[in-house]
Amino acid sequence: MSNTQQIELNKIQTGIRGLDDITNGGLPKGRGTLLAGGPGCGKTVIALQILVHGAKHGEPGIFVTFEEDSSRIITNATTFGWNLSELESQKLFFLDAKPRPDIVCAGQFDLSSLLASLKVKADQMMAKRIVFDSIDVLLSLLDDPLAERRELFRLNDWLISSGLTGIITCKNNDSCQSRLDYQDFMQYMVDCMIFLRHDVDNRLAHRTMRIIKYRGSSFNSREAALLLGDTGAEVIAFTLSLPQLSASTERISSGIDRLDSMLGSGYYRGSAVVLSGAPGTAKTTLCGCFLLAACERGERSLFIGFDEPAQEIVRNLRSVGIDLGPYVDSGLLHIQSLRSSVSGTEEHMGMVRKLIETYQPRCLVIDPLSAIVNSHSNDEALRRMPEQLLALTKSTGITMICTSLLASNNDALNEDTNIHISTVADTWIHISYAMLAGERNRSLTIVKSRGTEHSNQVRELILNSSGVSLADVYQAGGEVLMGTARWQKETAEKATEDLLLASVVHKRRAIELAQAEVNARVEVLQVELAVKEAELKLLLATEDTRVKLSNLSRDELWSKRSGDDLKPSSENWHIDKEC
Amino acid sequence: MNNISSIPKHTSEISAATHVFRLYIAGEAPNSILALHNLKALCLELYRDDYRIDVVDVLLSPEKAWAEGVIVTPMVLRVSPEPVVKIIGNLNNTDQVLGALGLVIKDHD
């Protein structure tokens, strides 16, 4: 552990993004680094940038130029936004050491005076870094392999003894047959060697950087893309490790309610979503829904489109009820349109990274991702790019939706998609066309969604001027129905339902009627019963009266006859009567 | 650097010489000393007494030398007669020196 710290301490930061990464901390301090490359590779820019970075951070530097005039270098530097004139007096010193054309060389010379003078100057301004730009120009004057080696040795010894960190640039043209002797020698001599290349591949120029050696340090030996942008050189290094971050459990809306419910309740914050589908499957529209929802939540968003002007994107989305205009105006949403064909994958990645840094969005859309990886890209870049993009968005917690154009409609479940994004995407939504009954309709499925309980159902994606919605699809006779077929089926089903409902109502009414009839009859009978009861009561009362009257009349008769005192017992009477 | 006094600054007594040279040297670097010897020998042979060599040690004022376009040493400047001629190296290659000074090589024999 202490060993690695020791190494860290012995490096100087270059200030070039990516270069410090691939060198694991910068260039060797107090040693020489050789920057070799053909014309137009960016040797001078890189060397100057390292020097300027030092000058701005308390490490003054000296730039010895053997090739270009210092005034021109200073002018060129202003195009990168480096204000050298304010550094120049104390922190930055340019030495024009360009050999004059009228000079005649007669016999051996050496760099001892130059180096001794530089030492005086370096001590004076407390310089820590020094650049020798195009040492080969000077060495060619020597015209003697032995002398060249001797002077290089002198230079290297001087660097070590003076404690300055040296950057020596050197031309290295592979196409040149006569490979110069000192170049080989120089590679053995220096502690760090960086090789630059400028290639044209498929009519697209791109620069690369590779570290060939770095004594006493680990380094990334992979060839990295070198970009010369607005602010200087930048190395797009493919880092090999994914950032370690806590996964968010927050869910955010996709902008379509039904899609949210299909996903379990939206996307995870910080996840990567891929929308795949053939052209015209409304991928951009779904992106628009997502951005609108993000803007409505007040989240800063970024839309990176390719080959389509921002105004057109806004206009087209407005036609389906997604109005991003106000958010673009307020600055909450930035729409950036890039050209897909002018640069390669690494350049695009660099632009995307810069845009993310500038706008710091919480939600990001890249439409389409396929444009980043264009035909100029090699397999390595193709494989690495999605990983890099994810590392970038995941480390910043950005929720990203990117669209992916699939050439064929039925590619969805083919793992060998154009871009190897499927393995890295958290959620993959595929939109395809269903051709049926002379119609083309869009169907949406969730191919996968990590960590969410998502729907396995196919839904029809419907776009109209009021917005985007998802509808159930019908299955009939083993076929999925969509569009007007779905509408027909829906209508037919509704008719059947209505019919069923009507018949039920009818039946209920009939039963109710029967019920009512029975009840009415019950009432009549009850009245009849009451009448009968009354009749009975009357009968009994009449009978009672009759009996009483008859008894009375008999007694009276008896007494009138004045016969026998013995009255007939009432019991007997009754028995008689009943008999 | 302090022992520079051992090298005479003006090797000729004639102040208004026809042939004036300025030799830039780096202290006592071998090539510098060799260049001074070679230049002296050549001047004696070519011009007898009619020459002057001003020796400038660039280590004493590096920036002044840089301003005068002196990057590597040794370097000789023929200040007069015109045109100004610049030669770098220890002047071991006499033919090239003569050629630079515009003198025909066969005269040397």
Image: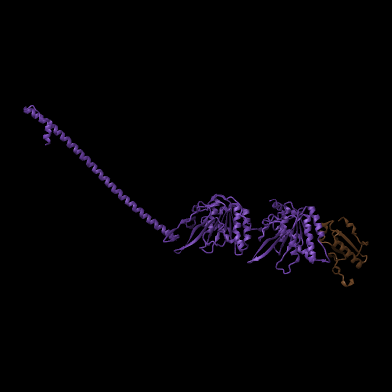
In the figure, is residue A48 to the left or right of B41? left
* Residue A181 visible in the shown view: yes
Residue A343 quadrant: bottom right
Q: Say above or below: A292 vs A562.
A: below
* Residue A100 visible in the shown view: no
Residue A19 quadrant: bottom right
* Rendered shade, chain B: brown
x and y percentages locating residue B98 in the rendered image? 86, 69
* Rendered shade, chain A: purple
Name the image colouring: by chain
x and y percentages locating residue A358 in the rendered image? 63, 53
Residue A112 quadrant: bottom right
x and y percentages locating residue A420 in the rendered image? 57, 60
Residue A284 or A112: which is nearer the viewer?
A112
Residue A43 or A89: which is nearer the viewer?
A43
Number of numbered discs on residues: 0
- In the rendered image, the quadrant that contains the C terminus of chain A is top left
Q: Say above or below: A128 vs B108.
A: above
In the figure, is residue A425 to the left or right of B87? left
In the figure, is residue B61 to the left or right of A414? right
In the figure, is residue A238 to the left or right of A520? right
x and y percentages locating residue A235 in the rendered image? 66, 58
